[in-house]
Amino acid sequence: MRNQFILSLCELAKINKNIILIVGDLGYSVVEPFSRQFPDRFINAGVAEQNMMGMAAGMASEGYHVFVYSIANFPTFRCAEQIRNDVDYHNLHVTIVSVGAGLSYGNLGYSHHAIQDLALMRSMPNTLIATPIDPLEVKSCLEYLVRNPGPSYLRLGKTGEKNHRNVQPLLDIGKICEIVPSKNKKIILVISRTIEIGKKLLDEKEFFEFGLFSIPLWSSKSKVEFMTSINQFKEVIFIEDHLEDGGFCSWAREALAQSSIAIKFFSFSLSSNIIGKVGNEQDLFDISGMTVKNIIFEYRKKSAQN
């Protein structure tokens, strides 16, 4: 995903002279294509994320669209005040690019686990959230964000993600995006790195009739569009690589609670028992219960209760 981000940003920067990239002394072996092509629009702000965000806000106030690139929690929690007061409040054209969605950097420990980032960023009322599941969605998200500049948060995986479609999807805020069509008005809805879990579930008999969808673009203001988008289905399973409180599943439940639409739904989030654990992404998914086996077990139990 991060390689696709840089390639797409370079293409867009050839057309849009106001695009600037700021990094926090990282991203090397990834960001070089941009720094070589646009050296006057590339800035290394050093290990000073709060200053980096303030710099981005200042440049955006002068008409630039600034992309701020860093790992996991560093461009979010470390500079939350600057995002809140400088970027979101003033509705500036700053896109915060977080690399290492969920547990992508699991081996580096809790400081690098992006498992509360959505709770923070979706509390910013003007900020659009982008949670692509593959490089094609990254390209579509980036093109949308450049066409519709404003405060935004682009949540990327670390590396090695494959495409799950043959054609680049068309996106709109709050609208779900088909990956595998539904056979019986039932769908699994995934974000970011949970696409692989969603695809494995389709091979299980309980989920044979389910389709697989993503939701690449959403915000605190797009709940009506989301409900309109899923109104055609009778059952939805939400899966996220984030803690339950404040994440995408929480956002979706809020949207459902505010609507008169009756949909049977189930949600699966990371368990808080992974906090403080160190390991690769799959190991941490296992510890958290984010496995096909456990989701099937919980789905059966919850279905019986309903």
Image: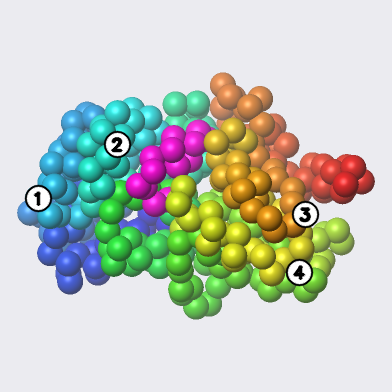
> Marks 4/3: CA distance?
11 Å
The magenta stretch spans residue 11:
no
Read off the magenta span. 115-129
- Kind of residue at badge 2: Ile
Quickly name the residue at label 3: 264
Q: Residue at x 23, y 64 (%)?
A: 10
| Residue marked by disc 2 | 83
Whether tag 4 and tag 2 are in contact, CB under 8 A, the answer is: no
Circles 3 and 2, Cβ within 8 Å, touching? The answer is: no
Q: Indicate left or right for 240 with 34 as reference.
A: right
Q: Give the quadrant of residue 124.
A: top left
What is the C-alpha distance between the residues marked 4 and 2?
39 Å
**Relative depth, front residue between 190 and 37:** 190
For mark 4, what is the residue? 185
x%, y% of residue 180?
66, 71
Horizontal and vertical percent for residue 253? 64, 45
Q: Is residue 23 visible?
A: no
Separation (CA) of disc 4 from disc 1: 48 Å
Of residues 13 and 7, the one drawn nearer to the viewer in this rendering: 13
In the rendered structure, which amino acid carries the disc numbered 4?
Answer: Lys
